Every structure is written in structure tokens, then in C-alpha cells.
Amino acid sequence: MIDEKALNQIVTQLDEMLQVIAKLHDQAMTLRRKVRGENPVRNVLALYDELWINLYARGAAPVVHYAFDRRSDPAHVKRLLKQLPELVLKGCVTKYFLDRDPFLVKNGHPFNLFLKRLPVYTATTTPPPIFTPAPAPAGCTHTPPCRSAKEHTDRKLAGLREVLDND
């Protein structure tokens, strides 16, 4: 029979082996992604940027992109991708932009608040479909662009009322 000291040594060695295996697995997956040309960090940040542009900078010339902190934000996404699959994280980004909390809208859905509020958006087990906002109504010149024809008409009428009231 194995004494307790020998058993503890074996368990310790097994734990060390499992850590090495996990590290090798991560390295192999990284190499596999590079060979395939995959970059999940870039994909998540690109989706975030695309949704931000559609919500806050659509129609701006030149195109205005979200101002990521290029030193820390990719590292945050990389860390999150170790915990969540890419599709689930993209679903969380989509849910974040669908969140109409006045504070988020007022501040332009900043990335740091997405990181802080992530548990709220990961609460469901199935990822939502990727959100693509509808194009602005034809002829809309408002900033930010109107999200529907009704909103465009309401804003246009409010502008006309303002002009009439000032006369």
C-alpha cells in the first residue's frame, strides 16, 4: 500500500503535468488559429467597432471609429475569450448595444462599462443573433441618424415647430 506522503507526491506530479498539458493546449490552439488566419480578438473588437459606428457615427465623414485603448482592450478581450467562446462574447457585445440604459447611451456605450457589465449580458445560455441595425431612413441628415421613419418624421416636425415658434 502507498503511504500518504507518496500519494501526495504523485498527486502533486499529476497536477504539474496537467498544468503543462493545459499550457501546451493553449499554444497549439494559438498556432492553429494563426495557420487558419483566425483572430478572435480582432473579430470581437471589429464587431464592437461596427456596432458603435452604426449607433453613434453613422454617416460621419470621415468615418469615426471607436477609440479603443490599444494597450489594454485587446488584452481584456483575450482574457475573456479564455472564459467564453467567441460567438458568446459577440452575443454579449450585441446585447450591450441593444441596452438602452440612458447612462450608456449618454456616454456612448464605452468599452470599460461593457467589461464591468459583462455578467449581465452572459446571464442567458444561448447567444443572441448578431445585431445589425436598420439603415437610416432615406434623406435623414440628423446626427445621430434616426433609427426609424417614425423617429425621422417626429424629429423633422419638431424642427419645423421650432422654426414656426421662433417667427
Image (cartoon, rainbow, N blue to C red):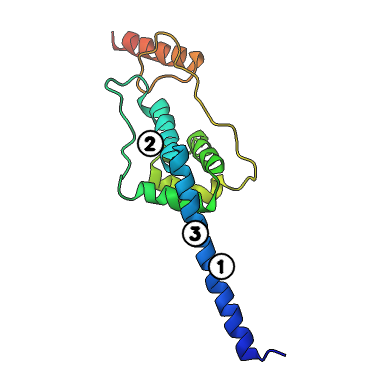
Q: What is the distance, in whole Å, between disc 2 and disc 1 at their CAs?
A: 44 Å
Relative horizontal placement of residue 157, taking residue 4 as reference (left or right):
left
Q: Secondary structure at mark 2?
A: loop
* 97, 102: nearer the viewer: 97
**Residue 23: image x %, image y %?**
48, 61
In front: label 2 or label 1: 1
The residue at which mark 3 appears reads as 24
Q: What is the distance, in whole Å, between disc 2 and disc 3 at their CAs?
A: 40 Å
Give neighbour class at mark 2: few <14, some 14-19, many 20+ (Cα, 10 Å).
some
Mark 2: which amino acid?
Answer: Gly
**Residue 57: image x %, image y %?**
35, 26
- Vertical position of residue 88 compared to residue 76: above or below: above
In front: label 2 or label 3: 3
Q: Which image quadrant: the N terminus?
A: bottom right
The residue at which mark 1 appears reads as 18
The residue at which mark 2 appears reads as 108
**Residue 22: image x %, image y %?**
53, 61
Q: Give the mark, 2 or 3, whose residue is nearer the N terminus.
A: 3
Q: Secondary structure at mark 3?
A: helix
